[in-house]
Image (tube, rainbow, N blue to C red):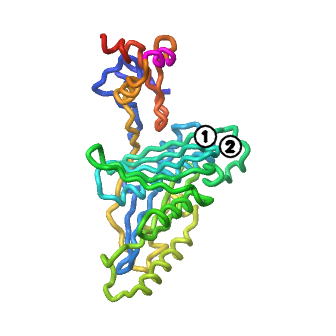
Amino acid sequence: MRRASVTDPTLPNAPHDDDRSPAPNVTVAEAVQPFHLWDKPVRGRLVRLGVLADVLLSRHDNPDVVKKLTGQALALTAGLATALKYQGSFSLQAKGDGAVPMLLADCTDAGTLRGYARADNDRLALLNGADAEAGALLGNGYLAFTCDQGPEMERYQGIVSLEGETLAEMTGHYFQTSEQFASRVWLAAGKGEEGWRGTALILERVAGEGGIDPEMDDETQDDAWDTAIALASTVKEEELLDDSLASGQLLHRLFHAEGLALGQPRPLSYGCRCSRARLSSVLEGFSEEDLDEMTQAGEISMTCEFCNTTFRFARSEVGAASRQG
């Protein structure tokens, strides 16, 4: 249990100059490995969350089948976010009518990652335990990807219905219907001796002629893309989740005969952005009557769904009472 102190930002009357929740200082230095295939219309990223997956997933007491889905979502979101050149955040949201009605993950341009899933344990008990995939867990609903570049820029969001048995298949459906380029995704998450791990392998077909052999005609480009997909499809889940197998080594196994070129790895880190000030502003939107109903023993408690940290506010800190003070 974390020891509370007078400077703990989760406590009532905590100072506002250091109001973020106490968070693990966890960074995986080479979590995202970009790569491309020379003179071929193929680029990609291999995401290995490492210990970061265990830190993020262990914040919530969800069943393993839900943690597995969340780990896949975290790795996928990190892989898609690090392909974009902007300042802001990229998020995945899946909302359905199943035993997991909400799945959310987001990653900033700096590589800070967070996510959570909301689960109905009674409905989960009716499913096929640890073998349940995203389609069975989420049910009918939608999948949304959102690029948020800050208040000065318009948000971009793509939404499609949940189609497919796995989260990878759902993502493929999104790319087929909402994007202008071909992509394929392989996802894995699981718990081993060292804790939870999560991985995403993402391939994208390069649009236009950039980086491609100018003498390569359309048919040859199609063949190169199909070959890359076939090679990537040979990857095994245990390889994706094996910490002892470096990302470069795994990619070499898959693509060494296709002119593999590795880019500069990128870090990922624990990144919940909740704060006492942010939650206090949320409380200010409630009526005095609602605030009174939330109050227990003179305090209001709010828990961040991402990091599962509870902030406590004295009733006098919020609403009209705080403004009069």
Q: Position of residue 209 (x, y in %)?
A: 32, 79
Q: Which mark is residue 119?
A: 1
Q: Which residues are magenta?
A: 288-294
Callout 2: helix, strand or loop? helix
Q: Which mark is residue 218?
A: none
292 over 257 or under it: above or below: above
Q: Main secondary structure of the magenta part?
A: helix
Type of amino acid at the residue the image marks with label 2: Leu
Magenta stretch: includes residue 201: no
Type of amino acid at the residue the image marks with label 1: Ala
Q: Which residue is mark 2?
A: 124
Q: Is residue 53 left or right of residue 84?
A: right
Residue lying at 30% horizontally and 76% vertically, measured from the top left: 210
Q: Nearer the viewer, residue 38 or 158?
A: 158
Q: Position of residue 215 (x, y in %)?
A: 33, 89
Residue lying at 55% horizontally and 71% vertically, measured from the top left: 233
294 over 19 or under it: above or below: above
